[in-house]
Amino acid sequence: MKINKTTKPKRDEKTGRWLGSEKGITPDELLQAFEDYKIWAKQNPKIKQVPNTKTDSVINLEMEIPLTKTGFILYLRREGITGSGTDILFNRDGRFEDFVEVNQYIDDSTFDDQFTGGMAGVFNHSLTARKLGLTDKQEVKTEEKIKIKFGGDSDR
């Protein structure tokens, strides 16, 4: 499905902020854009250069990238779909209530991709756990009693 790009994103002349409902995108179009982003992200891996000491060369490894909300927002802008991705995905000022269900799907999908990718070792599990707020936090308390003797005191 191709998104209707006849309505260009508009900015508020005073504040420079992207205007919300004037961007010409529906919840269904946003959902389709997210599905297209998922395909794009998996087809466009990062390249990691790893030295090969045996052959004195460099090996280019394709590294899968995780799905993220930020990556999706950048995809929306890069593809000219909407400049208001941040406003929509975070329901800024409560103006995007009709996008809530799609936003929840996007949240669940990005969380699942990062979590399962971290668990399977595709992504760095430590960074993934921190990003998703899954790290264990421990509070360490130490109590110590200190005896102080003053010069003229005897042990009693």
Image (tube, grey):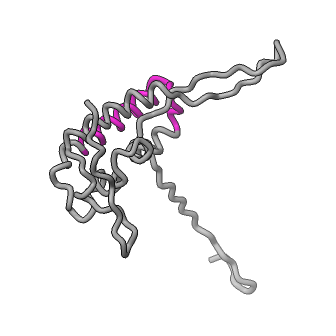
Magenta-colored stretch includes residue 114: yes
Q: Is residue 44 left or right of residue 147?
A: left
Asked if residue 39 shows in the view, the reply is yes
Q: Which residues are magenta?
A: 103-126
Q: Which residue is most to the front?
A: 6
User: Quick check: is 107 in the magenta stretch?
Assistant: yes
The location of residue 114, given as percent across then percent down, is 41, 34
Q: Is residue 134 visible?
A: no
Q: Residue at x 69, y 78 (%)?
A: 149
Foreground of the two, 153 or 139: 139
Residue at image location 73% in from the left, 86% down from the top: 152
**Which residue appears at 22% of the width and 42% of the height?**
102
> For the point 20% across and 61% down, which residue is it?
95
Extreme residue in the left direction: 98
Instruction: Looking at the picture, tell me which residue is in the foreground, 23 or 40.
Output: 23
Q: Position of residue 61 (x, y in %)?
A: 63, 22
- Foreground pick, 67 / 34: 34
Horizontal relation, residue 80 to residue 47: left or right: left
Q: Nearer the viewer, residue 33 or 156?
A: 33
Residue 91's place in the image compared with 27, above or below, is below
Main secondary-structure element of the magenta-colored stretch = helix
What quarter of the picture does the C terminus occupy?
Answer: bottom right
Q: Height in image: 35 above or below 135?
A: above
Left or right, residue 142 beside residue 4: right
Q: Quadrant of residue 101 in the image?
A: top left
Q: Quadrant of the N terminus?
A: top left
Quarter residue 97 falls in: bottom left
How far from the left and from the top, in percent, is residue 106? 29, 40
Which picture quadrant has residue 112?
Answer: top left
